Amino acid sequence: MTDNTPRLDHVVLWVRDPVAAAEFYEKALGMEPLRVTEYAAGTASFPSVRLNEETIFDLAPLTMAERMTMVPGAADSAGHPVNHVCLALAPDDFDALRDRLERQAVPVSDFTHDAYGARGMARRSFYFRDPDGNVFEARHYT
C-alpha cells in the first residue's frame, strides 16, 4: 500500500530462539516466515514473520539486547517491554486461530466480550502467550 496514513509497520519481539519462534508463528498463527534461512546462515541479524502485507514481527534474539543503544535504556527492554500485542482478525480467522492454538496445546484465556480497541468495541477476544512469554490478544470486531 502506498498511501501515507499512519500504520503499524513492525513490532520487535525478544525471543530466545528466533528459528523456533518463527516456526511457532507460522504453525500456530499462520504467519509467513521471512529471512529464516538468512538468519540461520548468519547473513541476517534476525528473522521476521508477516502478519499482513503491511506489518511484520521481527524476532530479535535476546543476545542482541546489549547492542540496543539507539536510546538510553533500550538494552534493558529485553524480555518484558510490552504488556501485549493485539491482533484484529476476521471472525472466521479468529475462530481458526483459537482452534489451532488449542490443537497445539497452547493455553488460551477465556473469551472477553465488548472490549474497546482501535476500531471501537470488539465482539470477542482472548489472550495467549508465545513460547518466549510474549502475550497476545486476538479479537474480532464484526
Image: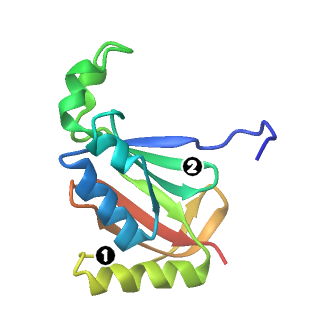
- Circles 1, 2 touching at the beta carbon (< 8 Å): no
Residue nearest the viewer, comparing 104 with 44: 44
Where is the C terminus found, in terms of image quarters? Answer: bottom right
Using the image, tell me which numbered label, if any, was put on residue 94: none
Label 2 sits on residue? 55
Mark 1 / mark 2, whichever is N-terminal: 2
Label 1 sits on residue? 109
Measured as percent of width and height from the top left, residue 6 is found at 70, 39
Tell me: 101 left or right of 114: left
Residue nearest the viewer, comparing 41 with 79: 41
Measured as percent of width and height from the top left, residue 12 is found at 39, 40
Mark 1 closeness class: few <14, some 14–19, many ≥20 residues within 10 Å:
few
Q: How many marks?
A: 2
Residue lying at 41% horizontally and 46% vertically, measured from the top left: 35
Tell me: 59 left or right of 52: left
Point out the residue furthest to the front here. Answer: 41
> Relative to 65, is 72 above or below?
above
Q: Nearer the viewer, mark 1 or mark 2?
A: 2
Q: Amino acid at mark 1?
A: Ser
Mark 2 closeness class: few <14, some 14–19, many ≥20 residues within 10 Å:
some
Tell me: 38 left or right of 130: right
CA gap between label 1 and label 2 equals 25 Å
Tell me: 124 left or right of 43: right
Residue lying at 20% horizontally and 21% vertically, measured from the top left: 66
Residue lying at 67% horizontally and 60% vertically, measured from the top left: 119
Q: Amino acid at mark 2?
A: Thr
Residue lying at 32% horizontally and 14% vertically, measured from the top left: 69
Residue nearest the viewer, comparing 41 with 27: 41
Measured as percent of width and height from the top left, residue 135 is found at 32, 57
